[in-house]
């Protein structure tokens, strides 16, 4: 999968290309990540990419022209890589909040061009003409778009075929089917007076599956009840819930 990141701090993306699942994906050539610094396309001795905002106010605004040239360069690289469906995504507090369905849709693309803003933001004309989608990772403000961009890339890369050593691992992640993940345990059996639930050591796969589902459902109901309303349960899961509710009466 092709990725191009427009950023003033390309070194930050070594966290993606050199470590963990995404680093292994890069070494296996499952992904291409190109970091493009808009300063390379800025004019003047100082290679400025920001200016004071029209109308006054604090801070600086990233200029449209160097960003446009950087995006066009990214599109050239995408074409050379044979990537056709490669939308431009701007990481922005004004964007839609990133969620699992969005990530699943991104996985089906040939790639992404991700624009990382800085300062007070980006000239609106650049957004209107060059940006296809705006996404946020939450209702808070960061110093720039690099960390949100890394969150986006990591969430996509780990779902690509061949990226994870255990291909089923991501299927059981939180939010994949709308529920949070269940509690996880490993050795030792006993830790500071607490034991691993016996069902997980039983070897009875059907009982383990039932226990995990009920734990996930209950945890989601307690912590994120708004998610439960949207979950589509299988017949078996509905039966497990009915059995639990009947047992609790």
Image: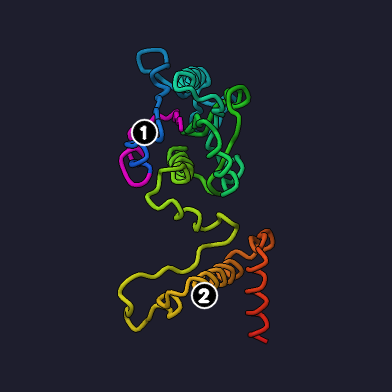
The residue drawn where x is 32% and y is 81% is 192
Task: Indicate the position of residue 8 as horizontal and vertical percent values.
Answer: 40, 29
- Residue lying farthest to the bottom in this orientation: 249
Residue 223: x and y in percent read 57, 67
Q: What's drawn in magenta, residue-wise?
A: 1-21
What residue is pinned by disc 1? 29
Q: Is residue 199 left or right of residue 227?
A: left
Residue 241 image point, x, y percent: 64, 74
Circle 2 SS class: helix
Q: Residue at x 62, y 74 (%)?
A: 240
* Closer-to-camera residue (172/156): 172
Placement of 66 over or under 97, stated as above or below: above
Q: Residue at x 37, y 81 (%)?
A: 194
Instruction: Compare residues 83 and 205 and report the one nearer the observer.
Output: 205
Q: Is residue 143 visible?
A: no
In the depicted structure, whether residue 115 falls above or below residue 197: above
Q: Are marks 1 and 2 in contact (CB under 8 Å)?
A: no
> Does 8 appear in magenta?
yes
Disc 2 designates what residue?
207
Query: Quarter of the image holding residue 178?
Result: bottom right
Residue located at (48% from left, 71% from top): 205
The mark closer to the camera, 1 or 2, is 2
**Would residue 3 be counted in the magenta stretch?**
yes
Separation of marks 1 and 2 at Cα, in angstroms? 40 Å
């Amino acid at each position: 999968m092709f990725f191009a990141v427009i950023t003033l701090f390309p070194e930050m993306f070594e966290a993606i290309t050199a470590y963990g699942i995404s680093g292994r994906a890069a070494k296996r050539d499952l992904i291409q990540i190109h970091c493009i610094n808009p300063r390379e396309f800025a004019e003047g001795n100082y290679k400025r990419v920001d200016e004071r905002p029209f109308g006054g106010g604090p801070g600086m605004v990233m200029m449209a022209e160097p960003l446009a040239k950087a995006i066009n360069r990214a599109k050239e690289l995408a074409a050379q890589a044979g990537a056709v469906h490669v939308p431009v995504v701007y990481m922005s507090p004004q964007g839609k909040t990133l969620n699992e369905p969005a990530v699943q849709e991104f996985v089906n693309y040939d790639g992404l061009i991700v624009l990382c803003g800085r300062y007070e933001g980006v000239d609106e004309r650049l957004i209107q003409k060059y940006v296809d989608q705006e996404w946020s990772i939450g209702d808070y403000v960061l110093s720039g778009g690099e960390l949100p961009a890394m969150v986006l890339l990591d969430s996509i890369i780990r779902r690509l075929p061949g990226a994870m050593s255990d291909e089923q691992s991501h299927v059981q992640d939180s939010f994949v089917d709308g529920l949070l993940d269940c509690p996880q345990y490993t050795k030792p059996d006993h830790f500071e007076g607490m034991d691993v639930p016996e069902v997980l050591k039983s070897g009875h796969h059907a009982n383990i599956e039932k226990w995990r589902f009920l734990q996930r459902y209950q945890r989601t109901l307690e912590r994120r009840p708004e998610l439960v309303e949207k979950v589509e349960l299988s017949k078996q899961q509905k039966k497990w819930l009915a059995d639990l509710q009947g047992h609790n009466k």
